[in-house]
Image: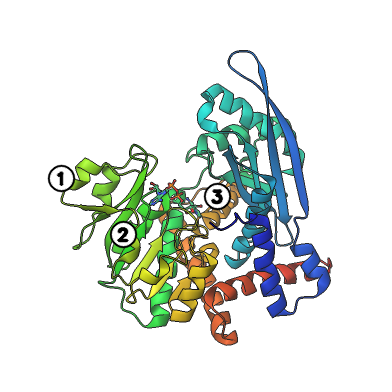
Amino acid sequence: MSEKINPFKMAQQQFDEVAEQMGLEKAVRDMLRWPMRQFKFQLPVRMDDGSIKVFFGFRVQHNDARGPAKGGIRFAANETVDTVKALATWMTWKCAVADIPLGGGKGGAVVDPATLSTGEKERLCREWIDAVWKNLGPRNDVPAPDVGTTAQMMGWMMDEYSKLRGEYVPGVITGKPVGGGGSRGRTAATGFGVVVTIREAMKHLDIDPRGQTASIQGFGNVAQYAARTFIEMLGGKVICVSCWDNNDKTAYTYTKMDGIDPYFLQGITDEYGTINREEAESAGYLVEDGDAWLYKDVDVLIPAAVEGVITGENVENVSEEVKILAEGANGPTTLEADAVFKERGTFVIPDFLCNAGGVTCSYFEQVQNDMNYYWTEEEVLDKLDHNMAQAFNSVLETALEKGLYMRDAAYWVAIARVEKAMRLRGWV
Ligand code: NAD
């Protein structure tokens, strides 16, 4: 079994490799290998039984040369500062490759939110803001939801920050509920953006999208909207999706060779993205092993569930028919599997480009908060389509111009944009 890699070391290694190719000067490398600022704090929370329990929290601002730091807050029992530092670094690259004027940040608390009552969760959220609010703000650092945190929690956090500032400041945090400062279109944004990048890849590869087939891992937020958009925007056919089943503690693939109906499946899926197996079976879906989605003869593979699922071992069984790998999830492909795709010439749309629709829509939320004027869902998705297509095409151009693999080109574009902003500000 391979040793668990420290995620921050991995983020540094990825950066070092591209920095070397780009010939970046030492001062730039020294700055970008490390977060600019990191905060660690205690979170004493009054529990329902009257006792005080002390949790620990973090906020890391990796780089804010291009604009305020941006990134989620994770509440997880196994949260570590190294995970948060790595995720903050990746946010810098994601915002830069999406070309939105934001930097990279991430935060968290070491807690399993499922063990807390609603009141305890609210007090923890308010405490988190109390601990770090002086370093946050629409012009400094703008958090968002992530693993273990919800739109309601963002609402409490925004309220706490506004109370401390003595004014309504909705733009301090994104991912708020619609009607409470949130943006329309946010739920669809990431899956929608994934398909915009697939559409642009097909244009480049001269593939007619109509009738193209896809296989998707996951049936949560990203996967559901990727499936709908693949069918509705491209005229394609999704032949399977997969999900984790909490009752059986195992994953299943749901296949229909003439095309799944995402609306029907959404109707029988719970809030955690678990499809009701009996109902799917009675509707004629073939239920297979959790990894069956990966071995289908399809044109497009869309991992949109969890990290590290396409590995050196299973990649050999991926069909040669697959033309595009669109990484909806973060980090679905291990380094060994990536090397195989590179060798085979599979067109890979790397995660931080492919799934940047979510953060782009968060940026739109902040813009709407600033104006105090809200767009319709159609306007939001139109703007998102434009941004994602541009982001994809600037990476493609760099890949073609410099003969780079798409993942390396995406890093190149992102790092070059951050370096430029640092130079323009006179930091290096
Ligand atoms: P989610 O929790 O809504 O859904 C996750 C889905 O994956 C569920 O259907 C779950 O059953 C399934 N799943 C979990 N383990 C599985 C397994 N072993 N095999 C098959 N299915 C499995 O999560 P989400 O918001 O859709 O996020 C999915 C991925 O996309 C994550 O990597 C996340 O970091 C990334 N991402 C999400 C967003 C966003 O806006 N939601 C933005 C950027 C990146």
* Residue tagged 1: 282
**Front disc: 1 or 2:** 2
In front: 14, or 124? 14
Q: Where is residue 315 in the image (x, y as percent from the top left)?
A: 42, 68
Compare marks 1 and 2 and give the one earlier in the sequence.
1
The residue positioned 32% from the left and 68% from the top of the image is: 234
The three-letter amino acid code for the residue at tag 2 is: Ala
Q: Quadrant of the C terminus?
A: bottom right
In front: 411, or 375? 411
Instruction: Decide if residue 42 is on the left or right side of residue 281.
Output: right
Give the alpha-carbon distance from disc 1 to disc 2, as whole Å: 20 Å
Q: Can residue 56 be seen in this view?
A: yes
The residue positioned 37% from the left and 58% from the top of the image is: 226
Compare marks 1 and 3 and give the one earlier in the sequence.
1
Q: Of helix, strand and loop, which one carries label 2? A: helix
Kindly give the residue lying farthest to the top in the view shown: 50
Q: Is residue 167 visible?
A: no
Give the alpha-carbon distance from disc 2 to disc 3, as whole Å: 38 Å
The three-letter amino acid code for the residue at tag 3 is: Glu
* Residue tagged 2: 292
Q: Position of residue 341 (x, y in %)?
A: 46, 75
The three-letter amino acid code for the residue at tag 1 is: Ser
